[in-house]
Image: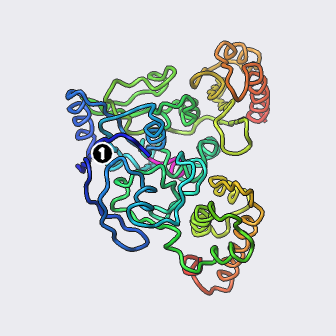
Amino acid sequence: MVKYSGYMEINLRINQVNHSVLVKPNETLLHVLREKIGYTGTKTSCENGDCGACTVLVDMKPVKACMLLAVECVEKSIMTIEGLNDTAIQRAFVDHGGFQCGYCTAGFIMNAYAMLLSDPHIDEQGKMKWLDANLCRCTGYEGIKDAVDAAQAEILGHQKKGLVETANIL
Amino acid sequence: MINFDFDYYRPDTLKEAHDLFVRLSHKGQEVIYYAGGTEVLTAFRKGSIKSDAVIDLKAVPGMTSIDKSKEYVIGACTSLNDVSQACPELGPVFDGIGDHTARNTITIGGNICGRLPYKEVLLPLLAQNAKVVVYNSSGLREYDLRSIFSKKLNLAKGDILYQIKINFDKLMVSYRFSESAKVDYPLVHLLFAKESDAYFVALSGYGSYPIFKSFDTMSRDRMLSFFKPYVKDCLKGNGAYKHALLSDALQKAMEEIDG
């Protein structure tokens, strides 16, 4: 049985790097990522699991970091926005006006990245279902939709040519 | 931020989890079982509940697995998305609960045992007469869900909801209305099922808690008369509006089920 009480050192694997960090059980993954390790790309917003600004991937599934305890994430693989590098979805957000103030952007990108990795052929209804988990107060949804659609088109184009696996070009 | 300290435990077996709950409770500690944690962390942050210890059940074998041999046997800590993927029959019902990302964290057992009154996961389970496997000091016991459900799942303090067993042998349809078109709690969520000449109706959002009733005739008036005393006004919609939504949903469900 595992027990965490008071400040204890835990190991978190984030963006394929092992981090040793001192945490208490009551600290959320969001707080630890930003305040203890310095991954400030993941944003604090509602802290209630509603807005999606804090979306990260845990074992390649999108989750809201404000709704997870850091101690729950030991022995899991965590990916933040800092773990993506020149992916199709990031390029698409830049090229297609996918952000205004940018605060929701990391959350949207992480969710969209996971979505297209899970099913690059996802249809409109499926895209709506996944991305309803993220809010944009600038209401820049048109640009976001254009970006996601463009990234999907690029991925499917590469797949059609038989060039690479989805994960390598996402 | 959660502004109080608590201890976090992650036991490896049901017995370990239950014995720990009993031991800590006897010491006078407030102890909570922890599954997905979405409701617990929200309540902790708001200060509506406090705890000295949380016991995370997700590491217990069988808690996050789904077996599909003779019937579906679903671990209580399985996420709603994982359940939907394995049991497509439940997907349409679960789609309204939270949002897609949240459903990677919300668990089937947590939705049943949590404090929120909607517990929409229960609707198909009640309609299909699912069974639940519970662990307590006597070991594992299996119950018909309907026999231990009245307003909520009636478990003794310290009991652990371990698995849900379900067969989908009844035709079922569901209709969900909410104030917003997007992510929102239900105004009325109807699940309507049929087996031979028996009809099963499960409701969430309409009253203060999920309601289930079986009927031997498909009479919409009779069903509406039965449920009307349970309707509850809320900020999202008054009783009359909810009742009208229910009437509409029943009409559509009956047409869909009977072709």
For disc 1, the neighbor class at 10 Å (few under 14, some 14 to 19, many from 20) is: many
The chain carrying label 1 is B
Residue type indicated by callout 1: Tyr
Q: Which residue corresponds to the image point at 53% horizontal and 31% vertical from the top-left?
A: B116
Considering only vertical position in the picture, is B228 above or below B101?
A: above
- Which residue carries the number 1 mark? B8
Name which quarter of the figure residue A166 lies in: bottom right
In depth, the one of A44 and B53 nearer the eye is: A44
Rendered residue at 29%/59% (across/down) = A22
Figure disc tally: 1
Mark 1 lies on a secondary structure that is strand
Q: Quadrant of the C terminus of chain B?
A: top right
Closer to the camera in the image, A129 or B222 = A129
Residue B83: image x %, image y %?
51, 48
Q: Position of residue A17 (x, y in %)?
A: 37, 73
Q: Does B176 appear above or below B203?
A: below
Residue B79 belongs to magenta span: yes
Query: What segment is highlighted magenta in the picture?
Result: B78-83
Q: Left or right of B142: which side holds A134?
A: right
Which residue lies at the image location 77% right of the left edge and 36% below the top edge? B256
